[in-house]
Image (spheres, grey):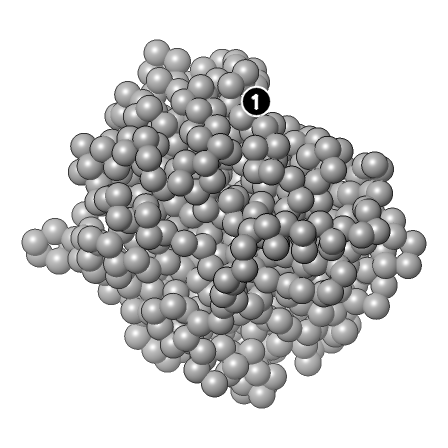
Amino acid sequence: MMLKHACFIFFLSPLFWFGQACAAELPKSTKVAIASAHPLATQAGMEIVGKGGNVFDAAVAVSAALAVVEPSGSGLGGGGYWLLHRANDGFETMIDGREKAPLSASIDMFLDKQGRVISRLSLDGALAAAIPGMPAGLVHLSEKYGCLPLKVSLAPAIRYAQTGFAVGDKYLKLLQSRTGILKSYPASAGIFLSNGKVPPLFSILRQPDLANTLKQLADSGREGFYDGAIADKLVKSVKRARGLWTKQDLKEYQVIERAPIKGEYHGIKITSSAPSSSGGLVLVEALNILSAFDLQKTDTVTRKHLITEALRRAYHDRALYLGDADFIDIPIERLLSQDYAAGLRSTIRPDKALPSSFLAGEMSDPSEGNHTTHFSIIDDQGNRVAATLSINAPFGSGFVASGTGVLLNNEMDDFVSQAGTMNGYGLIGGAANAIAPGKRMLSSMTPTFLENDEVVAVLGTPGGSRIISMVLLAVLDFAENGSPESWVSVPRFHHQFIPDVIEYEKYTLSPAEISGLASIGHQLKETRNRYGDMQAVLWHKKTRSLKGASDRRGSGSALVKNF
């Protein structure tokens, strides 16, 4: 079956959904677990549950708080995906709040007259910014699934923006990497820099303009961002900086609900993100390929080789077939088929790597943002949210729209700009992900639920093109009865088809493993830094006990709290 798009369309009033969402919380949850990339965001979610909110209200609060306290990874000027499960009826959906190309965008907008990619044009400044989906996603999540008014759920984020918070070491390191572009725009420099330089550790970051924008969203819903005074400021500022936004772009933006991708691996039910994210499809395809191998009984070199070969083939299909499901036909049924996986598996030799150049199909240029954020929430009834949010590169485009405090994404770099070139993160993609007006760019974000007879897990991570391989390694650890702390701590290695190299964190591979993998044809490269920032929570069905874990590579927090 060729599936152009799978979505849910709702015509019922917000008041109807208000009642339905609250009914989902009966009996009322008494315990909640939240893991996010920042302690203040985790606290914001708990604060809202304490005020009578459900896990979906908490997700609004955590999303908005991260937009304030982690501007390097997400924000009102970005977008993302919220994967939801409602316990009373088993309903599951994915809210697609991915950004969209402006209506005046064109396939060659980042090329010069000779058809060559103009360096940095899709990464820095207003032209790199797509139309944000985060504000619309927050409103949609609150109105259709929450119990509390949006004004209540956004209150912690507004408070953090208004009064400020102390910035940490991780924030400052990422800020240092983008100081040059932030200095180029007065509104950006005025917020994030101190006299054009990185501020001292633990200095207070205050964002009064962003607090006002959040207040407008809280008071007026989507019109508070996509219309009126805030929209006027956004469009005026972007146009002045030679961007493409118009009032029509903002007014026409809508989130869409999609049927999640479903799969199974050794008795584990997998629910994950659907296109416009490639995450769920690539994850399930790779696991399908691996399902016939007994990874626990293989030696460590063969195990890592087989995982690499499965990732190579799944990422190859990502490059060939995946993009915005509203614009292209995606062979979802085939890509998820066990028969198809068996065919791919038959091409894997246990004693030899297959060069990526031997895989068929014409490639073009893709993309993927590296710094993103994720949070996971579950209550003792099983209601849950996995959300991965992004503005693409650290601090997005570096451009803040004057008078709004909104740092804009650079997600236009996640489209194909020209055949045969790579984006800033080395991914190769196909024409399926070419720029088109109103189109959502392909993503690797992979918010995921795992479930067996005893437990439910909620997890995900930032990490650009490496997200899918990180989640896959966590799934394999889950299958071997690992704990949340184990999933988020698994040593990481990665292969994405092109470049044809296994990237690995320091200490992930032993000298014997490096030698063994190289001897069968793999190229290997140690990453300079540890990567990812996985957030995970776990619910035991029988005892209703909860656990959570936050990746020690980051500076987040996981809390379990009784109410």
Q: Position of residue 13 (x, y in %)?
A: 54, 55
In this figure, what is the number of numbered marks? 1
Q: Position of residue 546 (x, y in %)?
A: 83, 47
Task: Locate residue 289: give its quadrant.
Answer: bottom right
Q: Is residue 443 left or right of residue 417?
A: right
Q: Position of residue 25 (x, y in %)?
A: 76, 51
Task: Locate residue 123: give its quadrant.
Answer: top left
227 vs 26: above or below: above
Residue at image coords 76%, 74%: 267
Instruction: Write down the residue under mark 1.
Output: 159
- Note whether residue 424 is visible: no
442 vs 526: above or below: below
Tell me which amino acid carries mark 1: Arg
Residue at image coords 51%, 44%: 139
Circle 1 crowding by C-alpha within 10 Å: few under 14, some 14–19, many from 20: some
Task: Locate residue 33: give its quadrant.
Answer: top right
Determine the secondary structure under disc 1: helix
Which residue, as the protein is rendered here, is positioned at the far top? Answer: 195
Residue at image coords 64%, 46%: 146
Residue at image coords 57%, 83%: 337
Q: Is residue 360 left or right of residue 215?
A: left
Which residue, as the protein is rendered here, is positioned at the far right? Answer: 543
Which residue, as the protein is rendered here, is positioned at the far left? Answer: 113
Q: Position of residue 95 (x, y in %)?
A: 53, 56
